[in-house]
Amino acid sequence: MAQQKRPPNSRGYYVKMKLLQKHGRPHHHHHHHQQEKNCFYRYYKWVLWLSLSLYFFTSYLISNNNNHHTKKPSHVSRALIQSNHTTTPQHALNSPESLKKLKVFVYDLPPKYNTDWLTNERCSKHLFASEVAIHRALLTSEVRTFDPYDADFFFVPVYVSCNFSTVNGFPAIGHARSLIASAVNLISSEYPFWNRSRGSDHVFVASHDFGSCFHTLEDVAMADGVPEIVRNSIVLQTFGVVYDHPCQKVEHVVIPPYVSPESVRDTMENFPVDGRRDIWAFFRGKMEVHPKNVSGRFYSKKVRTVIWRKFNGDRRFYLQRHRFAGYQSEIARSVFCLCPLGWAPWSPRLVESVALGCVPVVIADGIRLPFVSAVKWSEISVTVAEKDVGRLAEILERVAATNLSTIQRNLWDPATRRALLFNSQVQVGDATWQVLRALSEKLDRSFRSSRVSRQLDFDT
């Protein structure tokens, strides 16, 4: 599809054409002219009346405002202007300017790339489900545009994490690269936008172990690297480390793993964050007593094995190796929640701990944590080096004796929890909102923005 040159005021032009189609073209005769004239006077009187009403109403509000300093007059007039647009969410008034102007086009791909996978309900709930949640939230977001020529970024909704293995139930992502390549092939042949920017303003989600490498085993992931097809794009990925790594050799944003906000709310109803915490240090998960060598690597670099061997008999530690559906209630009753690496450095426990007010104890050297501008990780968590895991008890005792209450106060700030949870509709400060904020800082990659930035500077 060739890119057509658009008329200068294309949106006005589009609306006019739509109106002409709807109401037909005018017939030029005297009676019609007279009607137009009467209509014009009626319209003029109506506009005058509306303007005067608005003027007196805003005058009243502004003068009234002087007695209530908490309300800003600028919000009043903006609220009035927007009152006709009932679809504008209230939080639009609080968004930073950059987000108000941001425009994202969401490709409407055939369902085999995304919604067909939702027949398995785990697809939208498991720890990799941010690929589903971000797509859903964008569909109803105020940043969404239906005009691709207006878009700063293009979201490509491909779900690759819902192919659950029939053997062990884990997500198998062997098909991921071919599914993404197929989607890119489709959008690049049907639209001009991929080719014009070589994909630099296109956004993908890679919410599994090693992110944009699309492999579950690190040695294979590192050997193959980021697939060439997305190498020039932006990838939202759960994987992030502070050192050089093949799986982040792409423009990317580190995002949190998915934890259902509904499950967090349900748990908090029974266990408020500032409630009684009768478990001192908690971990439930895979801890191998005799770790297996998997192609030269050991699960969690044996960190979890050390935790089990050293602290299983310690009454201060509540360690469990088996699954339990109600484990969030255990997190909500704990002071410290251990977040050791698994195969990858990150885990959903980071989000669950923060959301349920348990101090995360991060044991994953070099991990890069999500949304550092919104979540002050150093003020809400404890970091323990992998080599020091044997001294875990004394490290936590020292924290408990010194700055635990300060950490908990920071941790229990609702804004911190909000930043790590993906809601079905974007809310100010939530995880999808943080993604959009991160994108708004990458506008130099946008074909449209780089073309219009000079014009915008001139206009403002």
Image: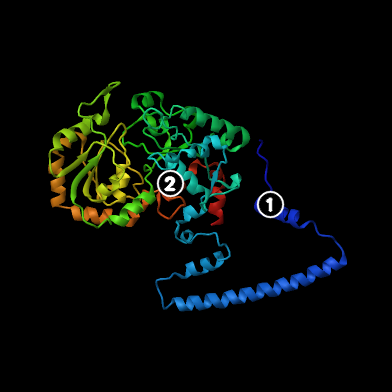
How many dots with numbers?
Answer: 2
Residue 61 disc label: none
CA separation in Å, label 2 and label 1: 31 Å
x and y percentages locating residue 442 in the rendered image? 46, 44
Count residues near mark 2 (Cα–Cα under 10 Å), then give few for <14, some for 14-19, many for 20+: some
Position of residue 233 relative to residue 21, above or below, is: above
Which amino acid lies under the numbered mark 1 shown in the image of this protein? Tyr
Q: Which of 363 and 34 is in front in this view?
A: 363
Which amino acid lies under the numbered mark 2 shown in the image of this protein? Val
Residue drawn at x 49%, y 76% as measured from the top left = 61
Indicate the secondary structure of the residue bearing disc 2: helix
Residue 266 is at least partly visible in this image: yes
x and y percentages locating residue 223 in the rendered image? 38, 23
Earlier sequence position, callout 2 versus callout 1: 1
Q: Which of 135 and 279 is in front in this view?
A: 279
Is residue 450 rendered to the left or right of residue 130? Answer: right
x and y percentages locating residue 397 in the rendered image? 13, 47
x and y percentages locating residue 247 in the rendered image? 38, 31
Position of residue 307 relative to residue 21, above or below, is: above
Residue drawn at x 24%, y 29% as measured from the top left = 301
Residue picked out by circle 2: 435
Residue 14 disc label: 1
Position of residue 30 relative to residue 189, above or below, is: below
Position of residue 339 relative to residue 426, above or below, is: above
